[in-house]
Image: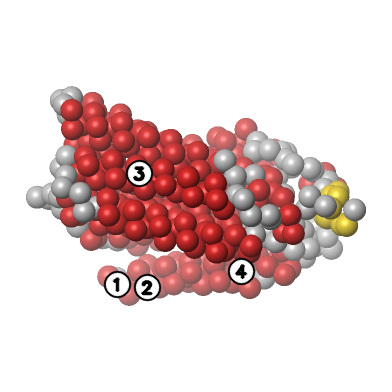
Amino acid sequence: MDIDRLYNQTFRQASWLELFFDLVFVAAIGMITTGLADTQDGHIRFDQLAKLIFVFIPMWWIWITHTLYSNRFDDDLSHHRVQTLGLMSAIVVLILFSSDVPYDGFSIFTSLYSAIRLFQSFMYIRVYVTHKDEIGFAKDVAIQIGVTALITLSSALFSGYVAMVVFYGGIILEMIWQYSIRGKLRSRPIDKSHMIERLGLLAIIILGESMISIVGGLTIEQFNPADILSAVSGFAIICLIWWVYFSYYDRFERSTRIFTGDILIFMHLFLCQGLLILAALIEHAILNDLDRSVFGTLAIIGLTLFYIGKQIPYMFAFPVLTFPIVVTTGACFVATFLATLLPSVEYQMLGLLGAVFLYILMTQWTLSYDISAYTDDGMQHDGNEYHTA
């Protein structure tokens, strides 16, 4: 591993191997969304929604850990390729047991997840042993992942709610632990352009699931005006979400307040889960197999998660935008709530489309604020380090 090569990269892009790695998460997301496909008398059970969250979080955390590792240490040599391909094969097996969460096969899922985490800990140990003088924090990350992996593994000794508390408690502990060592991580800043690109690609993968939902809904049911209206509205909603997500996304690259990327990483957990719920709702809107009140409730949950995940990073990176963002989010939430009061699901879809369109219009007001005090426009950069011009 060439340490100079790793840290003198400027604006590195996602590698072919990383894009290949993403394919396993396309499969994982497809498996996750099937949990919301079944309805009973127009209702979705609470445990179906909970399962989406319970399966997505560990899958997402594995993806984030590998992305952060690759961001700093991907040298495109054989050992990194072998590690990544081995990790992919383990994730494929993990996906096969995701349908058992949180039922009888939960212990197998937790054991496989913990084994993957221990392997990722080994990857950091290897970096530390090879470059302990230059990358001392790799030991801290390896310990953090290893200790919490043992905690999640211990959940296999329990059953029911106790097993779930131990397992997800271990994951939450690791998230807090990672945030607590952010000062050490700043010694080797992330490649912001690469990290932002990778998170954007994850969002694209999930938006793609929404497109699959539209096609799947239309091919199952006979075409009729209500189906077509729901499909067109769903397609327009996804296009507008893509528009508002990516139109100003590159601003994070210029933010002087983004160092470790934690705020973007953790808020994307909410954003992605919101988009997954919306993807399932679009298919149900086309199939018209969901009760109007249930549809409205899930729409509020999905868009609220999206708004939280989308807006908070901008408030952190550019504090001057806090007031317009709070006002915009409040107005969009009210518009979303009013949309759920409409008399049928297809009209609710039109109302949600209006709420997202309002979001885009109000974002133009937000853009009128000057954010130059929080960007590197007046600074020069060499690699990842910035200094006054």
127 vs 44, left or right, is right
Looking at the picture, which amino acid does disc 3 mark? Gly
Give residue 249's mark: none
Nearest to the observer: residue 28 or residue 323: 323
Per the image, the residue denoted by label 2 is 165
Give SS at disc 4.
Answer: helix
Which of the two discs, 3 and 4, sits closer to the camera?
Answer: 3
Name the mark nearer the viewer: 2 or 4.
4
Q: Which residue is mark 3?
A: 354
Q: Secondary structure at mark 2?
A: helix
Q: Distance of mark 3 from mark 2, alpha carbons?
A: 40 Å
Q: CA distance from mark 3 to mark 4?
A: 37 Å
Dot 2 surroundings within 10 Å: few (below 14), some, or many (20 or more)? some
Q: CA distance from mark 2 to mark 1?
A: 6 Å
| Cα distance between the residues tagged 2 and 4 | 21 Å
Q: In the image, which is nearer the foreground, mark 1 or mark 3?
A: 3
The three-letter code of the residue at mark 4 reads Tyr
In x, y percent, where is residue 175? 54, 67
- Residue 58 in the image: state x and y as whole percent: 45, 57
- Mark nearer the N terminus (3 vs 4): 4
Q: Name the residue: 16% across, 26% down.
A: 224
Residue named by callout 1: 161
Near-viewer residue (8 or 303): 303
